[in-house]
Amino acid sequence: MRRNSRSKLAVAVAAGAAVAAVLAPSASAAPTAANPGPGFPARYSAPYAETWNSPSALANARNATGQKYFTLAFVIAGNGCNATFNGDTSITDSSWTAAINSTRAAGGDVIASFGGASGTELGLACTSVSSLKAQYKRVIDSLNLTRVDLDIEGSTLDNTAANDRRNKALAQLQSEYATAGRRLDVQYTLPVNPTGLEQNSINLLNNAKSNALTVNLVNIMTMDYGPAMDMGKAATDAATALHDQLGRIWTTKSSAQLWAMEGNTP
């Protein structure tokens, strides 16, 4: 089984489909939502920008490499059922909002990733579907997101009540946004072996389907399996195994559609 580690700005590859200066808002002013973004092409990479770092990391990476899509990692619980960046930074932090706006002005966009290996995952902190849904909605609306990622790993994967709560909340939001003419893509980032997902991840995805949640992407963490091995072959083996596993869940999808559901974080 893989160990929990990930390098800064590790690339998440989807096989499917300068920071602006701002004045700090006054104490009485409501936080300003991020500007809408252009969305994502069918194929893209979205490296992890760690939210304990400076928001200028987005502009620095873009200026150095031309990279313009990023995954903000991670949104976790702060004090109780309260979504924050890294457990200690407001989702409406003006510096992060400015960095997101600058990225979008340059033609890029961001994904918010909920969870990760450390801190308290929001689905554990929020003990009702309604409270969890409210926190997801606050993040989505504040950052003007069209795509969210759920990085579920470790013992959190075995919490079937939290998994069900999470899938229900996201399915309701997805339906409500669709009614309002907005798109919300939902993806899961999950640990993997060269032989594919373990049963707890398969159970999570089956639960998503049973709750009528449209999962647009399953992003596998092809890293740190434990023993030494050919990492390239291990990654392709894992992707092939995932293709077959997804086909046993979403039985009406074609092979091409199943491949289009895969992402890979090396």
Image (cartoon, rainbow, N blue to C red):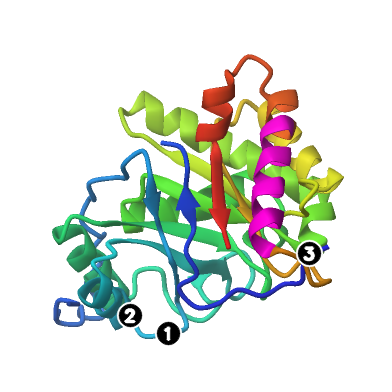
Q: Give the range drawn in magenta.
A: 231-244
Q: Which residue is the site of mark 2?
A: 57
Is residue 240 or residue 123 the one in the foreground?
240
Residue 3 horizontal/vertical position (percent): 76, 71
Q: Which residue is drawn at 56% across and 53% down?
A: 264
Look at label 1 and name its amino acid: Asn
Look at label 3 and name its amino acid: Gly
Is residue 136 or residue 101 the one in the foreground?
101
* Left or right, 85 with reference to 76: left
Q: Does the magenta stretch include residue 3?
A: no
Quadrant of image for the C terminus: bottom right
Which quadrant of the figure has residue 80? bottom right
Q: Residue 151 carries which label?
A: none
Q: Which residue is the site of mark 1?
A: 53
CB under 8 Å between callouts 1 and 2? yes
Question: As displayed, is residue 94 above or below residue 203?
Answer: below
* Left or right, 193 with reference to 219: right
Mark 1–mark 2 distance (CA, rounded to whole Å): 7 Å
Q: What element carries label 2?
A: helix
Q: Is mark 3 on a helix, strand or loop?
A: helix
